[in-house]
Image (cartoon, grey):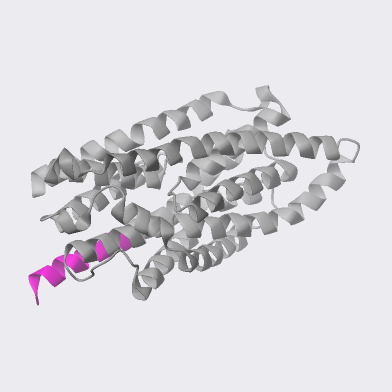
């Protein structure tokens, strides 16, 4: 077998493994609130999330092109395949570590940090498109802040509208609405997160000379969408527990507000071709909703631990990818 083809096969396998792990790592993004409020049984919620993730993953490619071309130019890298391997291994390791400890860290941060670190060590700082890298990081930073504000505002509006209604009646209605928002949340997750593995695979195909442009092939779309859906079907129960109950006690109206807020931010980013952290978006929306409900109701110690993870993921992933490249290549 052609050695270059074998190496490319390894890259595709690693990228799909990353997508699979991303799926079960980020399942909580879509279904934590609906499961914690018992709007959906866990098994039903996971099937719904897997299906909508698959549909969403097939419908857009703008984020994939952004990931694959905005941090570096794959056509200018002599060792692009090795860079991609170091990137994926580092991102997978960090995802597994944070999943094991039940910390909702960002797969997006891990992948982008790892890619920048691998390019820096493997090709030098001149090969990093700093403007593109900064644009992506700005999107990652501002999207959770926007999600927090939207979640806060949406919850304030809902409290004002339903202030005179019976809490039992309100929650019963919103428990049904959560089924719709869980599906929407899963769909938007697929439109953004699955694109990242597509972008990395396409990046590898371009740098290996098997593609001329960053246009994502159909087989890459289907493979990434399937890996994401299968990963989602496994579920990430540790993270679901953190997001669904440890931040604050979520009721159906809160879950609806958080889901609709996060989904709007994620889908807007997809339309703008910006990779964002779905984990950060939904966590921030939950924090915003909880703050609107009652500031003291939010367990800020847990929230602080999550925020620390947000800040350290990019540098740790970058260093890890750089070390992996240095050691093995």
Front-lying residue, 43 or 315 = 315
Front-lying residue, 142 or 163 = 142
Task: Give residue 292's position: percent from left, percent from top.
Answer: 70, 30
Task: Give residue 62's position: percent from left, percent from top.
Answer: 42, 59
**Most common secondary structure along the magenta stretch:** helix
Farthest residue, direction front: 131
Q: Residue at x 9, y 44 (%)?
A: 327
The magenta segment: 1-17
Q: Residue at x 59, y 35 (%)?
A: 148
Task: Give residue 102's position: percent from left, percent from top.
Answer: 45, 40
Q: Where is 207 relative to 294, above or below?
A: below
Q: Residue at x 55, y 53 (%)?
A: 267
**Residue 322 occupies quadrant:** top left
- Does any portion of residue 248 appear in the rendered image? no
Farthest residue, direction bottom: 1
- Does any portion of residue 172 appear in the rendered image? yes
**Residue 202 occupies quadrant:** bottom left
Residue 2 in the figure: left or right of residue 220: left
Q: How many numbered marks appear?
A: 0
Q: Residue at x 18, y 61 (%)?
A: 207
């Amino acid at each position: 077998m052609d050695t270059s083809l074998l190496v490319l096969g390894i890259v595709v396998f690693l990228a799909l493994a990353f997508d699979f792990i991303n799926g079960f790592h980020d399942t909580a993004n879509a279904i934590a609130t609906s499961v914690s409020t018992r709007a959906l049984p866990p098994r039903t919620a996971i099937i719904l999330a897997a299906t909508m993730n698959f549909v969403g993953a097939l419908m857009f490619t703008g984020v994939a092109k952004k990931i694959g071309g905005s941090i570096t130019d794959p056509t200018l890298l002599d060792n692009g395949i090795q860079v991609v391997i170091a990137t994926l291994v580092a991102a997978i390791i960090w995802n597994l570590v944070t999943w094991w400890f039940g910390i909702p860290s960002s797969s997006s941060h891990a992948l982008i940090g790892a890619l920048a670190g691998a390019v820096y060590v493997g090709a030098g700082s001149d090969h990093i498109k700093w403007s593109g890298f900064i644009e992506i990081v700005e999107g990652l930073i501002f999207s959770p802040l926007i999600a927090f504000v939207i979640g806060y505002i949406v919850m304030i509006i809902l409290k004002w509208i339903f202030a005179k209604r019976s809490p039992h009646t309100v929650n019963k209605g919103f428990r049904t609405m959560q089924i719709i928002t869980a599906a929407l949340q899963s769909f938007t997750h697929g439109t953004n997160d699955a694109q990242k593995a597509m972008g990395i695979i396409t990046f590898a195909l371009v740098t290996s000379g098997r593609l001329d442009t960053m246009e994502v092939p159909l087989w890459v779309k289907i493979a990434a969408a399937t890996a994401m859906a299968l990963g989602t079907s496994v579920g990430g129960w540790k993270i679901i527990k953190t997001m669904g109950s440890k931040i604050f006690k979520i009721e159906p109206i809160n879950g609806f507000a958080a889901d609709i807020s996060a989904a709007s931010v994620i889908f807007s980013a997809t339309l703008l071709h910006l990779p964002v952290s779905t984990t950060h978006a939904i966590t921030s929306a939950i924090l915003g909703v909880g703050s609107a409900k009652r500031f003291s109701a939010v367990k800020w110690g847990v929230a602080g631990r999550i925020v620390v993870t947000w800040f350290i993921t990019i540098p740790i992933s970058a260093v890890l990818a750089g070390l992996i490249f240095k050691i093995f290549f």
